[in-house]
Image (spheres, grey):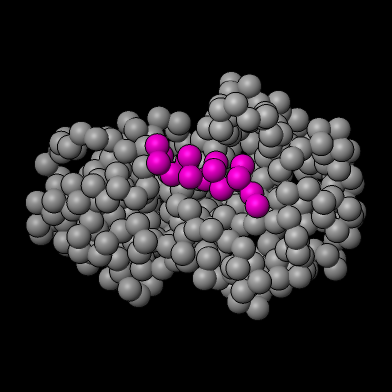
Amino acid sequence: MCGKKKHKILFMNHWAQHTGGAELSLIDIIKETSKYEKTYLISSENGKLIEESGKSGTECIIIPFEKSLSLLRRDNLFLLTIVNWKVIISFLFYILKCKREISRLSPDIIHANVPKSHVILFLLYLTGYSGKMVFHIREIFAVNSFAYFIYYLLFPSRNAKAIAVSNAVFRSLPKRIRNRTSVIYNGVNVNTQIKCRLSKDPQFLYLGRIVPWKGCDLLINAFAKLVNKYACRAGNLDLVGGTFYWDESYREKLKLMISDCHLDGRVNLLPYTDRTEDVYGSHDIFCIASTREPFGRVVAEAQGWGLPVIAFNSGAISEIVIDKESGFLVNTFSCDLFFNAMANFIENPSLITTMGIAGQKRIQKLFCKNQQIPLIVKSITEMD
């Protein structure tokens, strides 16, 4: 890219305060892109995404969302369109503000990172924007769902491409979008040292958002079964993360479950932390009970730190974890079967090391940030 005129690349991501996998990936992409191009970021709020992007010289623009716009979710968009028209009007005003900023910046390429940003870019295209567009698709949409038809109908017919974060995401897309989509995995950090166990009894970990679809309640129930059978040999389970952009009542429900199962001190519900390397380094086995994961950044990160993984065989998890080699993939959404997978590491503790090493090697080969992020940036900046 040296010697070429710098492109203006505008990134759009509505959340900035709390960083999930999509935002962490975008930070990496912006930092790499800013080495070669002039970069901009539009978001609806201040936060870590703005701070980290600004460090790379990216011009960050905050266009505040009205609080009511947080109600717009892909699973209730149709209902809200009917019963809460004021939210839709507010959203349209937000798009007009975005359009004014885009006219001022005159970017060569716009990269939309998450579904709300996709919808904004769809509507900008329908109202006259004709520049190059990249849609980073990080969701699996059910066939014939409302969101599926939105993408089918509104995906631009020209000057647009998509990046899917996994083959599972790619396969879920309408055919007219698949024809213009590349599959490029997210990149994660890999700890190149062999992980040493710090305790005799297994330390189980979930790291991520504490929200219903991540299956944290199932993890607690499965671990309760583990304690009933193995007592102290079951070790501990830590659930680490924040309940961002969701009702805190779910977190309170989990606290009550822990207490009712008499697991206080054995299951710990811990707050969000930026120091994920410390969390991975102090645990032995990673557990996640969500379904239809579009990628599973924490799954790749955990393996990169030498933790074997227990997960349901759903979505893109099987693209990261090799069953019985770098972890266990549970084929049926069952608490009992998840418990059985957890018990394997108590019956045969050596699996923690052997599977951990196998996973670490796989992540180094296929998901390392140093190779994946440049591939993503190349796909964004070298549009046809």
- Residue 121 or 206: which is nearer the viewer? 121
* Rendering quarter of residue 74: bottom right
Q: Is residue 225 visible?
A: no
For image coordinates 11% across by 41% down, the residue present is: 200
Residue 183, image x, y percentages: 50, 58
Q: State whether residue 79 is above or below residue 200.
A: below
Instruction: Verify whether residue 355 appears in magenta.
Output: no
- Quarter of the picture containing the N terminus is top right
For image coordinates 78% across by 57% down, the residue present is: 122
> What range is drawn magenta here?
369-384
Residue 143, image x, y percentages: 60, 76
Residue 240, image x, y percentages: 41, 42
Q: State whether residue 76 is above or below residue 165.
A: below
Kindly report the secondary structure that dominates the magenta region of the rendered protein: helix
Residue 78, image x, y percentages: 77, 68
Q: How many numbered marks are there?
A: 0
* Rendering quarter of residue 44: top right
Instruction: Verify whether residue 375 appears in magenta.
Output: yes
For image coordinates 45% across by 31% down, the residue present is: 274
Horizontal side, residue 209 vs residue 267: left or right:
right
Horizontal side, residue 325 vs residue 255: left or right:
left
Question: Which residue is most to the front?
Answer: 3
